[in-house]
Image (spheres, rainbow, N blue to C red):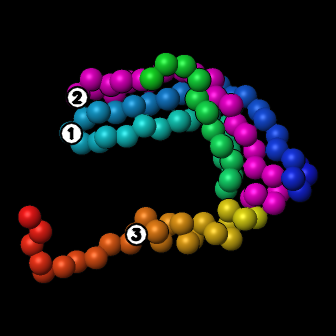
Amino acid sequence: MGLLTREIERAPCTVEVSHCFESLHAHVRFDNGAVIHPGDEVRVHGPEIMAPYGEVVRETREATIIRASSLERLWTRLTGDFEVMELCEFSFSEEVTL
């Protein structure tokens, strides 16, 4: 993998969408054992998957994995902690807003 070049690969995957009281999630498992690294992008092909309430839907799809370049991977590792902290920003106030 080059410093600035990206690689593209296709992988079969299983998509699981749960819309239950116990769990609301969507997961992608690569059936060929592909591993995602910092900075990589994944695009799952096919129509939107909608799970009715109380059900879990599993479908086999194909995904495109766009591998980050070495420079993008390094940048993601260096700045990733800051981006996570942005998600964690919150405050508590005793004031009631109407």
Which label belongs to residue 39?
A: none
Q: Residues within 10 Å of mark 3 (few under 14, many from 20)?
A: few
Q: Is residue 15 above or below residue 66?
A: above
Q: Is residue 80 above or below residue 25?
A: below
For image coordinates 24% across by 42% down, the residue present is: 22
Q: Earlier in the sequence, mark 3 or mark 1?
A: 1
* Residue 92: in magenta span: no
Q: What amino acid type is highlighted by mark number 1?
A: Phe
Report the Cα–Cα distance between label 1 and label 2. Answer: 7 Å
Q: Which quadrant of the figure contains the C terminus?
A: bottom left
The region drawn magenta spans 49-73
Q: What amino acid type is highlighted by mark number 2?
A: Gly
For image coordinates 29% across by 42% down, the residue present is: 23
Q: Is residue 31 above or below residue 77?
A: above
**17, 69: nearer the viewer:** 69
Question: Which dot, 3 or 1, sits closer to the camera?
Answer: 3
**Residue 85 visible in this rendered orientation of the protein:** yes
Give the secondary structure at mark 1.
loop
Residue 21 percent location from the top left of the image: 21, 39
Residue 54 percent location from the top left of the image: 22, 28
Judge left or right: residue 45 versus residue 72: left
Dot 3 corresponds to which residue? 88
Judge left or right: residue 16 versus residue 12: left
Extreme front residue here?
A: 98
Mark 2 and 3 residues: CB-CB less than 8 Å, in contact?
no
Give the secondary structure at mark 2.
loop
Dot 1 corresponds to which residue? 21
Dot 2 corresponds to which residue? 54
Q: Earlier in the sequence, mark 1 or mark 2?
A: 1
For image coordinates 54% across by 19% down, the residue present is: 46
Mark 1 and 2 residues: CB-CB less than 8 Å, in contact?
yes
Report the Cα–Cα distance between label 2 and label 3. Answer: 30 Å
